[in-house]
Amino acid sequence: MTGEDEWRGWRSATEEALYGPGGFYGGAAGPAGHFRTSVHASALFARAVTRLLGAVDRSLGGPPELAFVDMGAGRGELCAGVLRALPPELADRTRVVAVERAVGRPRGLDPRVEWRAAPPDGVTGLLFANEWLDNVPAEVAEVAPDGRVRLVEVAPDGTERLGPEPSAGERDWLRRWWPLAGAAPGTRAEIGAPRDAAW
């Protein structure tokens, strides 16, 4: 039996599961202990990103400081790879910033990598968000049997139920980006407003 105080929206549940105490991103193994991404598979990815950074530099006319900001940097692998791949003409003026809220600065990370919990203000360069936006928690809405759209609530054991109607702002987002009007009962949508705000 689930107590009333244990039900919550998917955004809150996902936030805790990913970033809370004992959450997926804060665990000892981290994401790389469970799956491989392009960052972990090969140095080719970091070299490709470094080429992109060079193109950004040229399009900006070679600013005195060129920033590379990696959102959701994990353990800083991409930042370290970009630093290794930087050509000499960029290395001296490139500021490399890892933005990660789930874990503290890893031991042994190149000291040139600036470690932050939030992105810096006023930088000129490349903001890189590889696999970041899909990890910004969002509410889930579902068309109820009566045709009304309701938020989906979840209990700690994964049991779901339909909760209240979305807020006015959430309804506006759904109407614009993921319309559910006339959809069959059981049809679901993620309300991506938090991702829009994060971006």
Image (cartoon, helix red, strand yellow):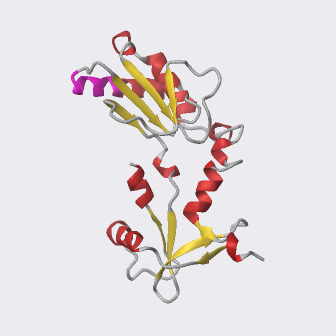
Expressed as whole percent of the image width and height from the top left, the position of residue 62 reads 25, 20
Q: Height in image: 16 above or below 35?
A: below
Left or right of 59? Residue 179 is: right
Q: Does the magenta stretch include residue 102?
A: no
Left or right of 4? Residue 75 is: left
Q: Height in image: 159 above or below 87?
A: below
Task: Count up the numbered dots.
Answer: 0
Expressed as whole percent of the image width and height from the top left, the position of residue 65 reads 32, 21
**Residue at horizontal 59%, vertical 32%?**
75
Residue extending farthest right: 1
Can you tell which quarter of the image residue 104 is in?
Answer: top right
Q: Height in image: 163 above or below 194?
A: below
**Residue at horizontal 68%, vertical 72%?**
5
Q: Does the magenta stretch include residue 58?
A: yes
Expressed as whole percent of the image width and height from the top left, the position of residue 61 reads 21, 22
**For the magenta stretch, what is the residue range?**
53-61
**Residue at horizontal 49%, vertical 75%?**
187
Can you tell which quarter of the image residue 92 is in?
Answer: top left
Left or right of 14? Residue 182 is: left
Q: Height in image: 9 above or below 69?
A: below
- 168 and 40: which is toward the camera: 168
**Residue at horizontal 73%, vertical 75%?**
3
State the quadrant of the N terminus.
bottom right
Residue extending farthest bottom: 146
> Magenta region, mostly helix, strand or loop?
helix
